[in-house]
Image (spheres, grey):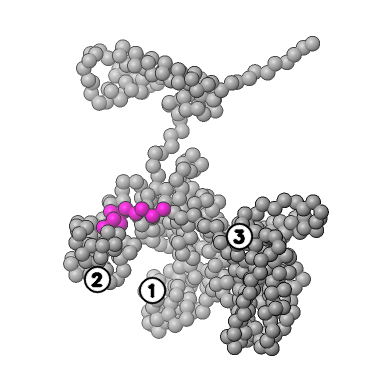
Amino acid sequence: MDVCVENVFITPPIEAINLIQATAEEEEKDRAASSDPHPGHPEPDAEQETVARGFSPADSSETPKAESAAEKNPWSAWSWLGVCKNSSRKIPDTIPNIVHVDVDAFFASVEQVLNPKLRGKPVLVGRGCVASASYEAKFLGVKTAMGFREALRVCPQAIVVPGQYEHYADFAERVRRILETYTPAVETAALDDFYLDFAGTERLYPDYKATLRRLQAEIRARTGLSVSVGAARTKVVASIASRLERPRGFRMIAPGDEETFLTPLPVEKLHGIGHVHAGALAERGIATIGQLRQVPKPALQAAFGEVIGQQIWERARGLDGREVLLPSTPKSVSRETTIEGGTIDTEFLGGLIEYLSERIGSTLREYGKQARTIGLRIRYVDHFSAHQTVRLTKPTNDERELLAAAKDLFAKLFTRRVAVRLAGVSVHNLETDKRQHELFDTNANRRWYLNRGLDSVRGRYGWNAVFYGKGLELREHYATKPNGLVLSTPCLSR
């Protein structure tokens, strides 16, 4: 009987690797000793470097050392185990791993994306004062927090819009999701402000600068928003670098160049120094960060307090111990909204509670959580509030089960013939989703698959791609957006 035996490559054991490495080091020492014409006498630095590489001082660049089979094949087991010393791929030891991403003129830019007629025109967003100004307006002298009367005097052709605040959180979430495809370490410092940590991704992104450029271009292509990017070893330097050349700024500060970068900048660029502190420093003849660095720490602490003085002294040198904070797992989830004018229509209120329960169930499944407690809160137009919580028979993230419990609570709380102006649903006592298929309750298993199918469809085509029957009536009262309904409370329209 014929037997076919395949070639099997066995990874060398650790003892063999150590023996091979020790032998290679001894051979290298022998070669170095034999090539030394004057043993016992140190050679010049340049010659020592060439000997360490395996060359004699007489070697030329045209006669490189012959490569071993393992060095020629970077996919061999020896290469993967690190035995090859002359690897062609060299990973930099240090990179400016902290990246600050700042959306340029966030509110105004979103308005220009939503209304293409505003693109290229000076746009002011806000009520009473400028909450955000497009760079077309900023280039003419408009500043944030400036009153509209003064802003229109500086820029008479500016277009004032009150702002569609219900859309801003959606655009910020879209930007955050794009950033998370590059690194999981993403911290949302503000609605349009993000810190990223690329430490440990050197092998994934060998061309680090090109990766950040691609990130910047992808956000522009997928959201229509331009962002400025700054990279450094600390948060404070990265944030200054990103804001230095807006809009669409890009600046990388190599490790060790922080003080050189900060020295000529005005003190106002330093995070933590406002107009008051800048004025106090200007009175003492300190206008740049370089001049600020010459001030002793005790003097700064005496002028600004021990904590603030210490902070200013450190950040003037580019020192910042803050790390990129990962998003924490929620301990509770709540969704609520106000109802303009109030209503006593129980059908409408039931549909609204159903929608809020859907959002909570989706959020729980996104975080892999289940809730043991659910609560309902309603407020009447006369400001009387009622709230009650109940413990569920078993933890769940099924929106149908959450809705059933919420409706029972609503029937107990809605006891007055007064219009309701606020409704909210919340869940507490969250735990990890460890659900197993039910042996006898087949309907529960079907709902489990149904919910995952809904999440998949909505994740690809938007929340409004599919909805329950009650949602049809809500769409007659509320406008829709890609991620759901535009409720009356902008910051909670999720």
What's the amino acid at mark 1? Lys
Is 462 situated above or below 203? below
Q: Earlier in the sequence, mark 2 or mark 1?
A: 1
Q: Check disc 3 and report the residue beneath it.
A: 430
**Residue 143 shows which numbered tag?**
1
**Residue 279 shows which numbered tag?**
2
Is 97 situated above or below 28? below
- At mark 3, the secondary structure is strand
Quadrant in the picture for residue 371: bottom right
Q: Earlier in the sequence, mark 2 or mark 3?
A: 2
Looking at this view, is 45 or 470 the one in front? Answer: 470
In the figure, is residue 96 to the left or right of 326? left
Q: Is residue 460 magenta?
A: no
Q: Is residue 319 magenta?
A: yes
The answer to whether mark 3 and mark 1 are in CB contact below 8 A is: no
Looking at this view, is 50 or 120 the one in front? Answer: 50
Quadrant in the picture for residue 268: bottom left
The answer to whether mark 2 and mark 1 are in CB contact below 8 A is: no
In the figure, is residue 303 to the left or right of 101? left
